[in-house]
Image (cartoon, grey):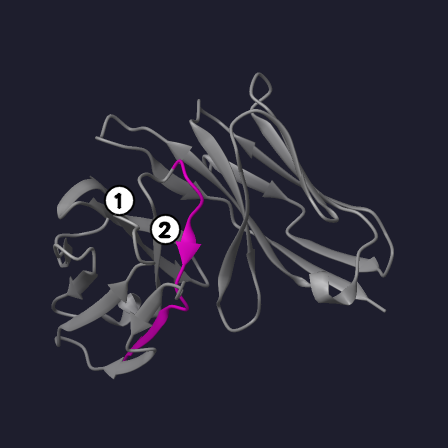
Amino acid sequence: KNEVEQSPQNLTAQEGEFITINCSYSVGISALHWLQQHPGGGIVSLFMLSSGKKKHGRLIATINIQEKHSSLHITASHPRDSAVYICAAAMNYGGATNKLIFGTGTLLAVQP
Amino acid sequence: KAGVTQTPRYLIKTRGQQVTLSCSPISGHRSVSWYQQTPGQGLQFLFEYFSETQRNKGNFPGRFSGRQFSNSRSEMNVSTLELGDSALYLCASSRELVLETQYFGPGTRLLVL
């Protein structure tokens, strides 16, 4: 079992729909990152959060530390939102710092 | 500010050879992390450097090594290449720690034949 689980693996939506991607993790974490990867490989960091909720434009990320769960929401989705969304948990395994453990990603396709 | 740069962008090697990849972080960033991305395993953490010191290491064999220079530029080396090392290698920089926003480079795509 992966320490970081994402769902769904694949998601197809119509333009304008509200989208939710979920991420759950099995152990305590220091922070959680949401990343976006477009075809060709480039990765952009969307959010880094350790509690509560963050909003940037049409994107909202929430985290519930007690339930070990985070969600990424996209409001009024657009075809340009089509990408792979990856959550990554910063975990400390006794080293000097945390290291990132990644979910398997959610492939989102938004159709016009 | 210029973003994170990685060289080379593409590389083809044969089994048994070694390879060195380079990463230049954003100016002022002292932490550089390396990641391997493959279709089967997804993204996996390789190691993190800060002020020329390796602070954390993922579960990769000793064939994978890295270093960081005083100007924060980092290199990773893979010796005795195997077919399974074919992957996209990404580096990311941040000011201090992985608890901060990570800025990713475009990656180096390595193909081992």
**Residue at numbered disc 1:** B58
- In front of the other: B111 or A46: A46
Task: Return the chain for callout 1.
Answer: B
Judged left or right of residue B111, residue A83 is: right
Judged left or right of residue B73, residue A62 is: right
**Could you tell me which secondary element the residue under label 2 belongs to?**
strand
Per the model, the C-alpha gap separating discs 1 and 2 is: 8 Å
Residue A67 at x, y percent in the picture: 60, 20
Magenta range is B99-113
* Quarter of the image with the N terminus of chain B in it: bottom left
Residue at 31% x, 70% y is B6
Farthest residue, direction top: A66
Residue at 51% x, 73% y is A40
**How many labels sit on residues?**
2
Q: Is residue A10 above or below residue A26?
A: below
**Residue at numbered disc 2:** B44
Residue B88 magenta-drawn? no
Residue A27 at x, y percent in the picture: 44, 24
* The quadrant where residue A20 appears: top right
Q: Which amino acid does label 2 sit on?
A: Gln
Residue B113 seen in the current view:
no
Disc 1 packing (10 Å; few <14; some 14–19; many ≥20): some
Does the CB distance between marks 1 and 2 fall below 8 Å? yes
Chain-order first, disc 1 or disc 2: 2
